[in-house]
Image (cartoon, rainbow, N blue to C red):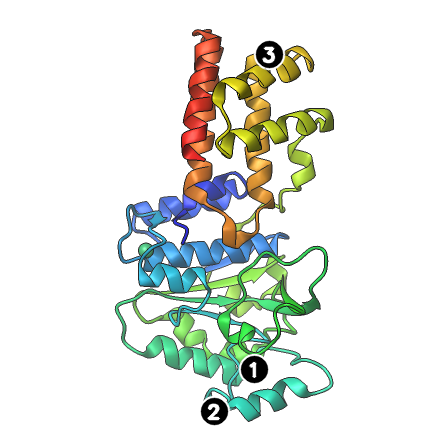
Amino acid sequence: MRSVDLATYEDTQPVAARFFQQALRSQSLAHAYVLKGQALASMYRFSLGLSQVLNCTAKPTDTVACGECQQCKWTADNANPAVMTVSRLTCVADDKGEPLGEDALKKHFSKTSSPKNITTGSVRWMMRQVALSSNVARVVIFTDFEESPVSDHPSDIVPPVEWTNRVDASVVQLLVRPLSPVIFNQASANRFLKTLEEPPPNTLFLFLTDAEENLLATIRSRCQVVPFAAEVDPAALMVNEAETKVLSPVLAQLLGGADVYQVQEVLNTSVIDALGLTPVQLLDRLQRLLRLDFVRQPAIEKDFMRYRTQQQLVESARQKLTAKTHPEHTLNDLLFQLQRVG
Ligand SMILES: [Zn+2]
């Protein structure tokens, strides 16, 4: 299982990542936020990462989750009972707020079209859950989901386990969509305004949407708004295709355990000499390449700590090179260090 460090989100979500780290360190986390942006999948992933940090029982620091404890494992699998996703497709319940049995669930989702909105029953069920006394942090993520066929571009969120239990996830995937007044309407919102105003202790509500106007004013006025950046386009990270072509396999060899002296030989001849890069430029490309690889990995395989260590190693080598300290040694040291991190 992977640990989570909120600092690693700074690459893709600098404002939000710093905002929440600061709030956690100063213990000033509010109980409700609107996460606003176009990158809904990124916002959902961040919400789960934040939930993991909040619930980790080992908690190496205020902003890091261990990835090993039971809470971390549940949250990483999006199967933590303390972390609820309220949407049209999850957290469904009958009008009284009782969870639906297997038959009722089938009936609910077998109608010609999928449910049109978050029902008052779902909100009731969620409220009942957060009202139960507990030592763990409750996180309630309000969002919209849409089911779509699994294509060449699989969704890289970890879907809630209650959804994967119901569908064949090899055929259908969940896309994260923004809340709107149709999806989360006045009737459902009114159900829980009082809870939102005076939430049970240790409860955090997150509302995912693309524009503030898409949330009812009654909800919006009770939340702080945190802006999220647009999703990073992996293609934009690497400027030069020719460089990527040469560097990518060299880096893979190195991280895969190839002989450092051989790798350095290749770097010298085919990268520094052939492409005409200076060692500082080389490290710049290396940083981008590591970032590109990281962004492209499926969420479940992302190893934040490892990525962060790699970036720190390259950055410190780059600083040394900029200060003109023994370029050969610096590069050589870096290659050895990177190989150790793997
Ligand atoms: Zn943990």
Q: Which residue is mark 3?
A: 278
Whichever of callouts 3 and 2 sits on the residue coming sooner in the sequence is 2
Nearest-to-viewer mark from 3 and 2 = 3
Q: Is residue 286 left or right of residue 70?
A: right
For badge 2, the amino acid type reads: Lys
Nearer to the camera, 17 or 102: 102
Nearest-to-viewer mark from 1 and 3 = 3
Position in image of residue 77 (x %, y %) = 45, 63
Indicate which disc residue 216 carries.
none
Q: Which residue is mark 1?
A: 119
Q: Which residue is mark 2?
A: 96
Disc 2 residue crowd, few under 14, some 14–19, many 20+, Cα 10 Å: few
Position in image of residue 294 (x %, y %) = 55, 41
Seen at 30% across and 48% down, the residue is 62
Whichever of callouts 1 and 3 sits on the residue coming sooner in the sequence is 1
What is the spatial separation of the Cα atoms under label 2 and label 1, in whole angstroms? 11 Å
Whichever of callouts 2 and 1 sits on the residue coming sooner in the sequence is 2
For badge 1, the amino acid type reads: Thr
